[in-house]
Amino acid sequence: MSNFAFLAAEFPPVHEAAAEAERQAGVSPTAAAFFAGKTVEVAVKWAFRSDPGLKLPHQDNIAALLHEPSFRRAAGEAVFAKARYINTLRNRAVHEEKRVSPGEAAGAVKELFHFCFWFARTYARCGRPAEGLSFDAAVLTRRDEALKKASVHIAAQQAEIKKQQADLDGKNGELTRLLADKQNLDDELKKARAEVAAARKAAEALPQHHDYDEAETRDRFIDLLLREAGWALDNKEDTEFRVEGMPNAKNEGFVDYVLWGADGKPLGLVEAKRTQREAREGQQQAKLYADALETRYGQRPVIFYSNGYEHWIWDDTRYPPRQIGGFYKRDELELLIQRRTTQKELAETRINTTIAGHKRPYQQRAIRAITKSFEADGERKALLVMATGSGKTRTVIALVDLLMRAGWVKRVLFLADRIALVNQATGAFKAHLPDCAPINLVTERTSEGRVFLSTYPTMVNLIDGKQQGKAKFGPGHFDLVIIDEAHRSVYQRFRAIFEYFDSFLVGLTATPKDEVDHNTYSLFDLEDGVPTDAYSLDEAVADRYLVPPKAISVPLKIVRSGLRYDDLSEEEKDQWDMLEWGEEEIPDSVEPAEVNKRLFNTDTADLVIAHLMRNGLKVEGGDRLGKTIIFAKNQAHAVFIEARFNAAYPNLAGHFARVITYESGLRPDVDRRFLEANQGAAHRHLGRYAGHRHRCAGSGEPRLLQTGAIEDEVLADDGARYAALREPVRPRPGQGVFSRLRLLPEPRVLRR
């Protein structure tokens, strides 16, 4: 009888995948690893679909779902570790095509049993598995005779596994689309979610007696993580290594793992503690082992200790212990030990003012504040608060240059939340620090470089080993991680990145220091309201590096007062009656806030466009409107505005105003053209836009165009429904910039 029979009645898709993993364990370790991972993925996605207590993360692939805090809390660290182990082994087998041993396959199936027990115990509505149920390893050896005799061509089997994995990956996004509108879920799903929530609540109230065999998980997971970091562990000196000089009767001890350098000296050691205990309980024992190894070999190893769930690194020559996502590779440990004697003093290393700081002393002050924090104070995290337009990116590039020249940093990771910001930062690094060989991980597949730039989702997938052809970065790969626009939502959605990498961490934000939330300061281990350095908008304006914005109101009665049916013409009343009002009764009036959501008034749009063309900021000696962004209420409103613009100015042939929302299908291309429209006196033109420089762009949703992506070129921001400005702008002749969005009660045009 299968170990997974308890799943069959209520969870048939989960049972099918688990039973296949069990069948393959003694025949094809690779297939067993794949089906074990598939089981976890099917089960976890079922849980997110059915359990209203789980919060859907930024993406609905298995890596993001497993690391979502609400799931980790529900599963507990023991079950989470098992699921992560199984998923990691599946990735090794399928995406990285690494060999899976029979022992690893059998171990994965055993871990899968415990995961599935938790899953069924938590969510079963018809009958939970018995608390005394245990895994029967003998089932793995009682192979079906037909399966034993089957001769499966390895290449064909691998192809079939890849196909099934591709099918699973192709379903990513379905969960997000299904749960996007929770108010309109179908009645059957609503009922099922309520029943599942009740089942989970009842299960959590019951005492837990199941033995999850945590000690075995610990050893299995630590071995896997060490092998992931390139430690083969195939020599007798690698494990249970005897040392002398320990404070016990026998004057000896045995180090769980020793990580050796090519010269035969110890680079690191790992002390493994039972999973019921905190990993930090191994700290003192590990220190004594390090003392013994240093006495014998003349080199102090870096200390790691772990309970299988939590991993800590302790280079006790410089820093206190800190949590880490895994283990360092050999070359990374060698570099860490080398830096003990080769690092230069940051305070004595000059700033390259051709990158930043020339005639801008606040940029030099920011760099020195960070280096003092790192060097004199022993900190590893820093937060810069700098007004938009004050040069955050160039400042941090100059910081990277200084840290590299001083030998503190070799590889850097720059993270941003949008592709446009990654592209912009990549260009800045190439312009100001070309020798660092910047790599845009969104578009490039090489791992050879010193500065890597990525979006958060791309990096989450790389950590998980999900993107073929791209390097999987270990926890020690980067010496510095930079977060562009650090804010609370970044940490909440992508905390797995910051928990994984062991590096210096620098955050950049334009949010005023008193408005940065508590969680952001906590991420950088700072007191509320006290960033590492701050340069405010008021300071920048007073120092004449930035200029304040000026908002100009465009008085329009409909936008201020709304619409009443009785005030409309007969033709307009007919249009009103034909609108899709849903299940609501046709109203007698529309409030101002609903005008552009419900009604697109031609006269209002024409008046705003005419006002913009007449009074907006001009270029080319005042002959043409400068680059301007129009924020619409939604996609349909943006399309409507574009149509009215083309109707008013047919001579511009549809190139002057363009919708650049995601739904338009043109955003990446139009964004690029929009960015380049004002650049250079030679009037750059591209492709089919030759001879026409588009100046207006309509965004159907204000979040699509946020701080930074277009700040160098935008002259004005015109709101067809609302406009925005909070922080201005880099002063250039005739140019200004908008930044953060703030709703205004009526349309406005922004001027310098």
Image: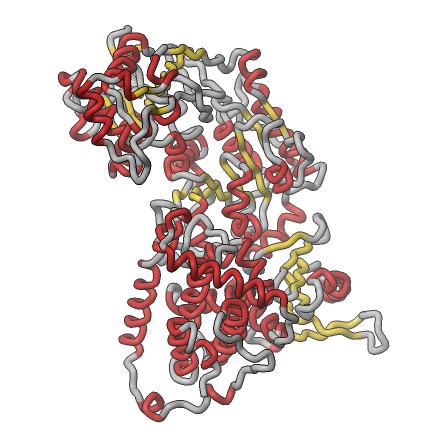
Colour scheme shown: secondary structure
Indicate the quadrant containing the N terminus: top left, top right, bottom left or bottom right.
bottom left
Q: Position of residue 584 (x, y in %)?
A: 32, 37
Which one is nearer the viewer's eye here, 316 or 267?
A: 316
Q: Is residue 654 visible?
A: yes
* In this rendering, position of residue 393 left or right of residue 367: left
Residue placed farthest to the top in the image?
621
Q: Quadrant of residue 571?
A: top left
Q: Quadrant of residue 301?
A: bottom right
Q: Is residue 168 above or below residue 646?
A: below
Q: Is residue 43 above or below residue 468?
A: below
Residue in the image at 35% along x and 50% along y: 177
Which one is nearer the viewer's eye here, 520 or 672?
A: 520
Q: Quadrant of residue 99?
A: bottom left
Indicate the quadrant containing the C terminus: top left, top right, bottom left or bottom right.
top left
* In this rendering, position of residue 652 left or right of residue 563: left
Q: Position of residue 315 (x, y in %)?
A: 68, 53
Q: Position of residue 138 (x, y in %)?
A: 50, 89
Residue in the image at 54% along x and 74% along y: 114
Residue in the image at 27% along x and 13% along y: 607
Q: Is residue 422 above or below residue 200?
A: above
Residue placed farthest to the bottom in the image?
145
Q: Is residue 22 above or below residue 688?
A: below
Q: Position of residue 289 (x, y in %)?
A: 74, 66
Which one is nearer the viewer's eye here, 492 or 679?
A: 492
